[in-house]
Amino acid sequence: MHNPDRPVEVEVVERVAETPSIYTLHLRFTDPEVASAYRLLPGQYNMLYLYGVGEVPISIVSDPDHEGPLEHTIRSVGRVTEGMERLQVGDRMGLRGPYGRGWPLEEAEGRDVVIVTGGLGCAPVVSMIRYVLSRRERFGRLVILQGVKHTDDLIWRRQYERWQALPNTQVLLAADVGGPNWPFSVGKVTVLFNQANIDRDRSIVMLCGPEVMMKASIDRLLALNVPPESMWLSIERNMQCGIGHCGHCQVGPYFVCQDGPVFHYPALRPWLGVTGF
Amino acid sequence: METSARFLPRSSVDSLFDAIRHEGFSRLVGPVVRDGAIVYREIASAADLPRGMRDRQAPGTYRLESQDDSVRTFSWANGPQALKPMTFAPREALWRCERDESGGLGFRDAAQEHEPTAVIGVRACDLAALQIQEQHFLKPPYPDPHYAARRSSLFLVAVHCSHPADTCFCASTGDGPRAESGYDLAMSELDEGFVVTGGTDRGRAVLASMGLDPASSLQQDKADREVEAAALGQGRSLPSRNLKDALYARLEHPHWDQVGRRCLSCGNCTAVCPTCFCHAEQDEPALTGETSEHLRQWDSCFTAVHSYMGHFLVREETRLRYRQWLTHKLASWHEQYGRSGCVGCGRCIAWCPVGIDITAEVAALMESGDAQS
Ligand SMILES: Cc1cc2nc3c(=O)[nH]c(=O)nc-3n(C[C@H](O)[C@H](O)[C@H](O)COP(=O)(O)OP(=O)(O)OC[C@H]3O[C@@H](n4cnc5c(N)ncnc54)[C@H](O)[C@@H]3O)c2cc1C
Ligand code: SF4
Ligand code: SF4
Ligand code: FES
């Protein structure tokens, strides 16, 4: 029986410092056979392994049809992620995946795609944004609402500015605390709904970020008569195995590692915002 | 192959053990008394079995008593140790990573050789729990080879329960006291010996190789009556219906606070529970720096780290951990595995240091229909 817990070796081929505590690793499989068999969907994640320290779940930001290395954008917060920050080009690590359910690509075809994201929870939606942008004709409008705490938390700022200039695309940004060079809104992401141009019948909404932010945003969307069936969200829980065995990621009946991390809102509705789940 | 019940005289139990060894299961594990409790350890012969031992169990209490006039060796209900550690090890390596001089990493599977072992005296509740754990660990698309290897090394000899403890309630969950499936051989103990039936081809082969007489209908009736009495004698119960909706409707019930104030969040209940599957993973690098082992180790939803998210815990308060445990066992388990996650073994009641009783807590939660008050 194949051992689903065992990673394979990958090599760091590029390392980008996004902010003082956020970095992007581009990882290449050292075994070409593994590389050619690997298939991913936007919204899925990998378990990344740092030698001698441990494994962590990290979203994949690469495009599924891109043949090059896999991109992971990581924030240093603890043992594993701080250790990974010290990796250099040429260093080896472990990877297994991809795991979980990604964004609903088929449901999204032909519709306006509304992305709502807050905090640093943007990695899972970046893959989706890139997916839409490189297949522009298959989707309607792209609306991106992004909230951050501090203005300098906004990674991919240049990317956002580039997206803003694209046709059929609306990008709205808000920071809890504004700053001298912050041309956008100040406040929670929910302040952006007034400015957003959301067609309730044509839109599919994808949310990612702190759960209070997502819940508040969903309430606003419901008030705009966006049907619950049009909303999807990506959540995080403690994950040790990624394959439905260790039990840490449970939310009610779900194993977030496999049943998520992307959920259809109606399925998650009873649990969203209930303290303790 | 014939399947009718056979009679094993008490004096021939060692011949049964020999026949099992002959089938390829050289190591025997059975109930023995250790540190005042009945647990499963390696045994050599029938003489190692806990003759005349009776247990007294109550919330927060477990005590053994010796009855010198009894010849019986299975007149007890389960102690703290379930079958679980033999299939889902408390701590085991999943893989090993080797690092060469140039920094290259090689990932190797942990060795998975387990000596074929026969377990003597498995109880119905533990067999039911085994089926639940199999559903969990062997479900597609990622069946767990570590679990599978341990499971396939076992030959299981069930003994139907004739002496349930006061904490047992398997009759109400439908998981005992008779072992219904999942065993190779099943036995009922009478004073003069055992009524034995086969559950698998290899179990029946063992039985056939012994040339035993058929059990008389008198012996079979007596054995059946003891098991029936064991079911009727159980004082505790859980409602036999699916409690999912009732519990989900009571997530804000004040009783969670009440039990949360008594609970020590020690995790004993999850450690003794035969169905709990949670585990943590961790790396253990060798001091030489050339290899690191990746291990899994039992964990519990009563620990703080279980729900650790870096900047916060999903379940900071004890009442939330108790609610996670109970609603997982009795509500969400139905959605995950099509049945409740409790087999009525009563271990969590006896081994709770403050005597929290799952049946009483459920009754208290259900008593008030005013769910949201
Ligand atoms: C599906 C999913 C996708 C994620 N994608 C990204 C991403 O793209 N970029 C990114 O920077 N972070 C991401 N995270 C969060 C990231 O996994 C944690 O920050 C990381 O596990 C922290 O590990 P640590 O050892 O450095 O920190 P420590 O604080 O030392 O954590 C110890 C252990 O606790 C667990 N843990 C702690 N925080 C989290 C958490 N937030 N989520 C899950 N497990 C946690 C891990 O097992 C971790 O090893 C994602 C989490 C999930 C569940
Ligand atoms: S919850 Fe308690 S009674 Fe039920 S199976 Fe687990 S330990 Fe036994
Ligand atoms: S979440 Fe709690 S009750 Fe459920 S399997 Fe894990 S330890 Fe047991
Ligand atoms: S991460 Fe282990 S069960 Fe989901």
Image: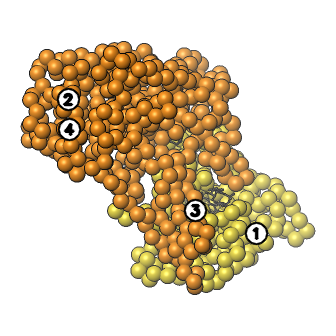
- In the figure, residue A208 lies in which quadrant? bottom right
The three-letter code of the residue at mark 1 reads Ser
Identify residue type, mark 3.
Answer: Asp
Q: Chain of mark 3?
A: B
Mark 4, secondary structure of its residue: helix
Instruction: Please report the residue visible at 82 percent of the width from the left and 65 percent of the height from the top.
Output: A151
Q: Which quadrant of the figure contains the C terminus of chain A?
A: top right
Q: Are marks 1 and 2 on the same chain?
A: no
Q: Pointers 4 and 3 in contact (CB under 8 A)?
A: no
Instruction: State the CA–CA distance, disc 4 to disc 3.
Output: 43 Å
Chain at numbered mark 4 = B
Which residue is painted at 42% across and 35% down in the image?
A: B39
Q: Mark number for residue A89?
A: none
The verdict on a common chain for dots 3 and 1 is: no
Which three-letter amino acid code belongs to the residue tagged 2? Ser
Distance Cα–Cα, label 1 vs label 4: 66 Å
The label number, if any, that marks residue B11 in the structure image: 2
Query: Relative to the observer, which residue lies in front, A256 or B44?
Result: B44
| Amino acid type at mark 4 | Leu
The N terminus of chain A, quarter of image: bottom left
Compare marks 4 and 2 and give the one earlier in the sequence: 2
Provide the residue designation for mark 1: A21
From this viewpoint, is residue A246 visible?
no
Question: Which quadrant of the figure has residue B85?
Answer: top left
Name the front one of labels 3 and 1. 3
Residue that appears at 13% across and 17% down = B218
Write down the quadrant of residue A159 in the picture.
bottom right
Circle nearer the viewer, 4 or 2: 2
- Mark 3 lies on residue: B283
